[in-house]
Amino acid sequence: MTAAWPAGAFVDPGRGLILGGIPATDLAATYGTPAYIVDEPELRARAGAYVSAFARHPGGARVCFASKAFPCTAVLRALHEEGMGADVASAGELFLARKAGVDPSQIVVHGNGKSLTDLAAAVRERVAFVVVDNPDEIARLADAAATEGIVQDVLVRVTPDVRGETHDKISTGQADSKFGFAPDAAIAAREQIDATGSLSFRGWHLHIGSQLFELDAFDRAIRTVAASGPCEVLDVGGGLGVTYGAGQQEPPTVEEYADVVLRAVHETVGEQVQLIVEPGRSVTARAGVTLYTVTSVKRNVSTWVAVDGGMSDNLRPMLYQARYEAAIADRVEAPGHPSNETVKLAGLHCESGDVLIEAVDLPAPAAGDIVAMPTTGAYTFSTANTYNGTPRSPVVFVGGGESRVVVRRETLEELGARDVE
């Protein structure tokens, strides 16, 4: 198996693809398709790797999962049990983190357009830090904290004008970004905070983007933001990338990433600063595999293999031209095998752009086959939708030969549950 699959996945000659000790075809038969399968041991191991890598920071480090990557109570709970907190960007994500048992002292709230509801929820829950993103928000947050009768600790998000090598839509550190303050404006923001009486400046926040492989970008961003002035807390965000398929770039290890981050932090703001790291995709992506059923095979100019999901359960290929790999669960063949046929893996939705993979080799695909697509544990469940009246898919945890539903499949009745007429 390539690095796109969970570390514990393998192919059994008689049973096909095995996920969490269970044949993928059995999982499809039990839970239906589409279904998000999550390898729980993989999930926990990746959380543990981050916690261990940053535990050596003398000033103390909090690893807060970027909950937008997989905002599911069971995922948040599992990661919290491995020592992670949560970073959230709305009252809804905050609600899920609290439901999962994450203590407010381990929660960071950020986002560029927080509503009054979001800010009030953060203050009411007494979260560790609210990351302020603009002058208007500082005033609104100060009012919310004063109303609640508390002094809220805040971080100021600084945009360091460092652009990592990634897709434009997930790059956030450039000067012309909707996120954060320019370095000179960040100093003015600190002065605005100090004048409120209900907010307490504690430090700086940065996040330069997602799906990044170049460690030097993290180093440069940290050094730029650290120059904004003294701080007790430095939140360096997240962004470490993952491999989505064969032939794609391999990411640095978590240890290599931690080495670069800690060196930059220690050489700028020192070893005693409180450090926060916010990984998301690199924790959950590889733990996830989506199962589909082939509904038809059509040959015209291309061979089109249609499945029973698509842009309703995975928007990433349409939003970012994300490239995945896939396999037929009961006959996984190596690249170059004579039975392989290069096909387009298409979704069911009424859009020509609803194509999950533009070109993938599958062995003699036929209706009824179970197709497995790996590395779907990040930004798939979180962006799922009900386009064409498609109920959202379940999440199934697997491990050690056992499986359980942690998010059930949406029903047809629930599609209209919010309708009032």
Image (tube, helix red, strand yellow):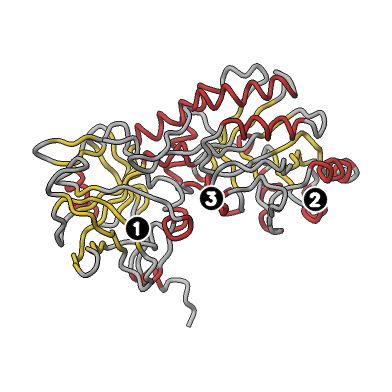
Residue 71 located left or right of residue 132: left
Q: Nearer the viewer, residue 281 or 232?
A: 281
Query: What is the three-letter code of the residue carrying label 3?
Result: His
Tell me the residue at 81%/52% (across/down).
135
Q: Earlier in the sequence, mark 3 or mark 1?
A: 3
Q: CA distance from mark 1 to mark 2?
A: 41 Å
Query: What is the three-letter code of the residue carrying label 1?
Result: Leu
Q: Earlier in the sequence, mark 1 or mark 2?
A: 2
The quarter holding residue 417 reads bottom left
The secondary element bearing badge 2 is classed as: helix
Tell me the residue at 63%/22% (across/down).
262
Quadrant into which the N terminus falls: top left
Residue at which label 1 appears: 356
Query: What is the three-letter code of the residue carrying label 2?
Result: Ile
The answer to the question of whether label 3 and label 2 lie on touching residues, with beta carbons closer than 8 A, is no
**Which dot marks residue 167?**
3
Tell me the residue at 19%/66% (across/down).
296
Residue at which label 2 appears: 138
The answer to the question of whether label 3 and label 1 lie on touching residues, with beta carbons closer than 8 A, is no
The secondary element bearing badge 1 is classed as: strand
Expressed as whole percent of the image width and height from the top left, the position of residue 139 reads 82, 53
The quarter holding residue 17 reads top left
